[in-house]
Image (cartoon, rainbow, N blue to C red):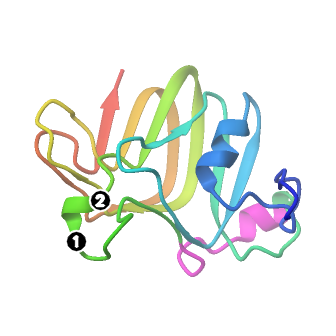
Amino acid sequence: MPRPRHGSSWAQAYQLLPSALAAAALGDTLVVAQGSYTPSTDNPMQVPAGVRLLGGFVGNEPINEETIDARDWATHATILSGDINTPGDSTDNSKGVVDFHGRFGAFMDGFTISGAFNYISNVDYVGLRCHGHATLRNLVIRDNRGYTRGAGLYVLG
């Protein structure tokens, strides 16, 4: 039986990004290796207040300020995707991909957010929703579709 992973190194990395986010707390930095990560159909990935989320890593480099500054997020794409079931079929995609909440803000750098499809008329976001304070850098937000407002990015307050 495999042991649970705690995320303290690449060898012990969480296999599911939502699990890592659920364990994160104010002041934590999560580094995310290249690849594709998905939420559930009805629940976007929740980024806790005050968490620093960095994508664009190969997944074997040491983590320090030098490697953080030198990472190539375009070459080593870290994709947060709403395309969770049948590839290319948007009707079974997640309704929302990423959700930021909290007055302490959050920081997100080096990700592609794509593939969400919200067909519900009373929900105003799809790809990325920011409620409160957030710093967003080096993001590609594409191919998200929504019934109402905010298909790619929806900002509240």
- Please identify the residue farthest to the front as the structure is shown: 1
Which residue bears the numbered disc 2?
A: 93
Q: Where is residue 101 in the image (x, y as percent from the top left)?
A: 49, 27
Q: Of 76 and 19, which appears nearest the observer? A: 19
Residue neighbourhood size for the residue with mark 1, other residues' Cα within 10 Å, grouped as few (<14), some (14–19), many (≥20): few
**Mark 2–mark 1 CB contact (< 8 Å):** yes
Q: Of 9 and 102, which appears nearest the observer? A: 9
| Residue 70 to residue 32: above or below | below
- The quadrant in which the N terminus is found is bottom right
| Residue 131 to residue 12: above or below | above
Q: Where is residue 129 in the image (x, y as percent from the top left)?
A: 37, 38
Disc 1 element: loop
Question: What is the quadrant of residue 128 in the picture?
Answer: top left
Q: Residue 56 carries which label?
A: none
Residue at (84%, 74%) from the top-left corner?
A: 61
Residue type at numbered disc 2: Asn
Per the rendered image, the range of residues in magenta is 66-77
Question: What is the quadrant of residue 62 in the picture?
Answer: bottom right
Q: Which mark is residue 89?
A: 1
Q: Is 135 left or right of 143, judged from the image as shown?
A: right
- The quadrant in which the C terminus is found is top left
